[in-house]
Image (spheres, helix red, strand yellow):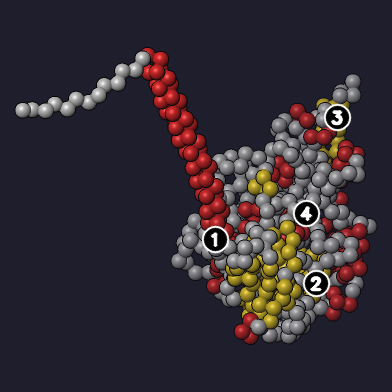
Amino acid sequence: MRLYLVAPCVFLDTTEMHRRSGKLAMLRYLTSRKILAALFVLVICLTLVYGCFSGQKTLASAPVLLTDPFLQLPSASSVRVVWFTEFAGSKHSVAYGDNFQQTATANTTKLSRTREDQESRVGNQTQNGQVYKQPVGRDIWRHEAEVVGLTPGKRVPYRVTSVREDGENVSSNAFTLAPTPTPGTPLKILLTSDHQLKPMIAANLQKVVEIGKVDAVWLAGDTVNIADRASEWFDDNRGGAFFPCLQGRAKSQRDFKGGEIIQHAPMFTSVGNHEVMGRFRKSGGIGDEFNDAIPRAVALKLYGEKSLKDNSYNTDTYEEIFTLPQSKEGGETYYAVSFGDVRLVVLYAANMWRTPNMDAYARGKYRERDKDLQNPENWGYGQVIFEPIAKGSKQYNWLAQELNSSEFKQAKYKVVMFHYPPHSLGDNIVPPYTDPVPNIERDANGKIKAVRYNYPKEADYLIRDVMPLLEAANVQLVHYGHSHLWNRFRSQGGMHFLETSNVGNTYGAFLSGDKRPVPPKDKKDYAALGDPNGLEPVVPTIAPLPGKDGKPMPYIASNDITAFSIFDTGTGTVSSYRFDTSQPKSQVVKFDEFQLLQLR
């Protein structure tokens, strides 16, 4: 017999079916909402966690110094140590002495004008505008400590340490420092200028240290191209920024690293045209600002007293970066300092470089561009002299007083350094160093037709006013730059003039053949060839380079051969060296030498 088990059947009416179906749908709806909400919360949590971890990762990465330390403003028993970071930090100090047992605490300040822009070469930006579309502020902190209690003639090891806000710290390698050397101490001083991230700088400075250590650096202006562009000082990604080259950390096209120099030797600088920034802008590029300096008197008329510096020109970044000797009248822009047997006088002789082009579109040395004629606010006003130096000016009077001081008169060697050349075969010595004289042409209705500038040769302030002072004070050497070549001269009274600025590149020499670009109808004020101020260049005394005719040339103007000069105070000689960067394995060649004689 078979048994059949039959499950009971339940029959529901349609109303009950719809009610249950609705509950099921609602359940599914609520469940999906809960799932979406849960996913949303999960995403937020993951985002927060990632942010926290990524922040921790940034802080956990090791802090780095933006520069090695370098030496500034030595005195008889002290010296300043300066370095830079991209973090404010909580503590910055110098450890020095045997076993680094002594400590000097640094003062920290933030650079006020440093920025990057469309033309910076920094980080991932290798072409214009890749990262930066306009000028953007870059936070950089400067640390300076004074190391005291030093003994002249004794070098002391030191290193710096910076502690970041999170407690992580970074220290430099160990270097050496010393106070100002006493008279009678033999010294070797590097004479240089016009670095400006040029291609041969790293090779030049590497060869300096290969022939021996130097005790100081005298740089006659033009440290960088544009002073407010931070990467030009610190970390231009092409490898040739200012500090890396002078600290042996550069990366050049031919694997030159520069030289470890200013970590051990103090540097004294003068203001060149590239240390000066023009009118501050809220749009455009930092380079546009650099090219837009106008006279302070014009800015005063156009804009009034308020923000006069922002509406004319300034050297703020240059003065914030360096700690230099100061004069009461000129601050760090012109000063005098004793260093061993030398009294060094540094002047502020620089003007706004403008193109010699005479075309209608040129805002140049000799004219305003046509489109700006009715808008004086857009004029360039020619080659603006940044600091008066003519007879009767504040700087001139300070110089006359300094040359009459006991410190100057008693010095064995008397050297004057500034940027603009009084004698040169280069292009930048033209026009004469004087204020532009405007010539404004108008039509019958008073509308401006042309604005041109003249520079009378007889009003050259350096030749007319300053050089007679230096000759009368028995100055032995005038060191300058600006034209990017090596040449030297000697006056009838025995004063030497050295332009040792074929350091990173050249713009040529104009002794014969090619002529300077000058106004064609004015040969009296603008010399196309030779030294406009009448001295003959001195042929190098040891190994001059031959010209195309096989004769020895009295200059070096090369984009392959770099030159530098060393002043040896022990022997009183100034020696110049050259190195062919196109032949990396070649030797450094001493090609010239002369002696500074007592002119009393």
Amino acid carrying mark 3 in the image: Glu
Q: Gap in Å between the C-alphas at discs 4 and 3? A: 34 Å
Q: Is residue 183 left or right of residue 27?
A: right
Instruction: Measure the alpha-carbon separation of dots 2 and 4.
Output: 21 Å
Kindly state the secondary structure of the residue where label 2 is placed.
strand
User: Which residue lies under the disc numbered 4?
Assistant: 315
Residue 114 in the image: above or below residue 5:
below
Residue closest to the far top: 14
Mark on residue 337? 2
Whether the residues at callouts 4 and 3 have beta carbons within 8 Å, the answer is no
Whole-angstrom CA distance, mark 4 to mark 1, is: 37 Å
Closer to the chain start, of discs 4 and 1, is: 1
Foreground residue among 565 and 496? 565
Residue furthest left as drawn? 1
How far from the left and from the top, in percent, is residue 81? 70, 71
| Circle 1 residue | 60
Are discs 1 and 3 less than 8 Å apart at CB? Answer: no
* Residue type of the residue flagged with mark 2: Val
Farthest front residue in view: 1
Q: Amino acid at mark 4?
A: Thr
- The image quadrant that residue 307 belongs to is top right
From this viewpoint, is residue 84 visible? no
Q: Which mark is residue 441?
A: 3
Q: Mark 1 vs mark 3: give the one in front.
A: 1
Q: Amino acid at mark 1?
A: Ala
Residue 373 drawn at (x, y percent): 80, 29
For the N terminus, the image quarter is: top left
Mark with earlier residue (2, 4): 4
Question: Which residue occupies the foreground of this view, 382 or 5?
Answer: 5
Give left or right: position of 31 versus 116: left
Q: Residues within 10 Å of mark 4 (few under 14, many from 20)?
A: many
